[in-house]
Amino acid sequence: MGYLIDNLQYANWSEKIFRQMRAGGVDAVHVTIAYHESFREMVLQLERFNRYFEQFPDLIFKGTLGDDVRRARDTGRTAIFFGFQNPSPIEDDIGLVEICHQLGIRFMQLTYNNQSLLATGCYEDDDTGLTRMGRQVVHEMNRVGLVVDMSHSGDRSTLEAIDHSTRPIAITHANPHWWHPALRNKSDDVLRALTDAGGMLGFSVYPHHLKGGSDCTVRDFCEMVAEAASRYGARHLGIGTDLCQDHPDSVVEWMRVGRWSKVIDYGEGSASDAGFPPMPSWFNDNRDFGNIRDGLAAVGFDTAEVDGIMGDNWLAFYDNSFGAAHA
């Protein structure tokens, strides 16, 4: 069986979840460690994970290269790769891009939902594309091996990032807009440009990104993946569940509001649905990846394609993305 990689989770981490990862045979997870945090606050999250690595060395360890996924499989553990969902930890200092890579960060979104110093988020009315700093930061990320992630960015900014980047980029956790027209889901033009340039799309199971929300069936989800494969090629597709397990609803407020607003911004939710939405019945935690694997096979993918989508495609991307650019 191929590797199993979930390329985006933001859980309330605990021994329980780490053991569920092992029970589910998860070889690697890309873990969000920053939304609106400053550099120093982000470092505190690294300290927290260092304690987890010390406490649970038989379950998890820090990953920085594709070979760490192979080592995880060989040793019966889960490799944890770090990423940011906002560039706030680099503040206004391009030199921190390399420092963050040296600390083990491997993905960084150029925006969350709002305008940043680098690009425009998907909730802004006017997408002005990459900023002057954004173009330089993309170049620096390419140089050191920090992956450009445009999951929460507007279309123009995403297309400009794809065009400006000299290395393939990622949309780690989103679905096609043609399947479900959420603001966070991506247009066909964006997904074609992404995959034509060698980039990766990770499909999300977060209910706001699903057609039918929490009631979406695994069959509906896998039929969407099959249509995406017919349009963009199965080798560019993976999973990025956006699993936010065991968090209190106060955490989704931090994700949406941070420190930028005095009033509540409900994002993809609403006043009547302000918290985390219920997960679909077929995916509640890391033990449920088999439901997706079986669903992909049921809609006609062959074994190699299923293995690719479940993790082998991300592993190939890791192998090519996390090291310094070749001169």
Image (tube, rainbow, N blue to C red):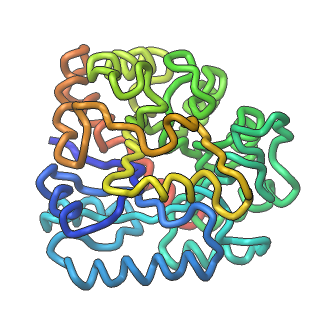
Vertical side of 322 occupied by 60: above or below? below
In this rendering, would 263 be left or right of 292? right
In this rendering, would 284 be left or right of 148? left
The residue positioned 22% from the left and 83% from the top of the image is 55
Vertical side of 55 occupied by 262: above or below? above
Viewport quadrant of the N terminus: top left
Q: Position of residue 276 (x, y in %)?
A: 43, 44
The residue positioned 22% from the left and 66% from the top of the image is 71
Q: Position of residue 92 (x, y in %)?
A: 79, 71
| Residue 141 appears anywhere in the view | no
Q: Position of residue 281 (x, y in %)?
A: 23, 31
In this rendering, would 51 be left or right of 55? right
Vertical side of 284 occupied by 263: above or below? below
Q: Position of residue 252 (x, y in %)?
A: 50, 52
The residue positioned 68% from the left and 76% from the top of the image is 96
| Residue 81 appears anywhere in the view | yes
Residue lying at the far front of the rendered structure: 272
Snapshot quadrant of residue 147: bottom right
The residue positioned 77% from the left and 45% from the top of the image is 120
In this rendering, would 320 be left or right of 307? right
Viewport quadrant of the C terminus: bottom right
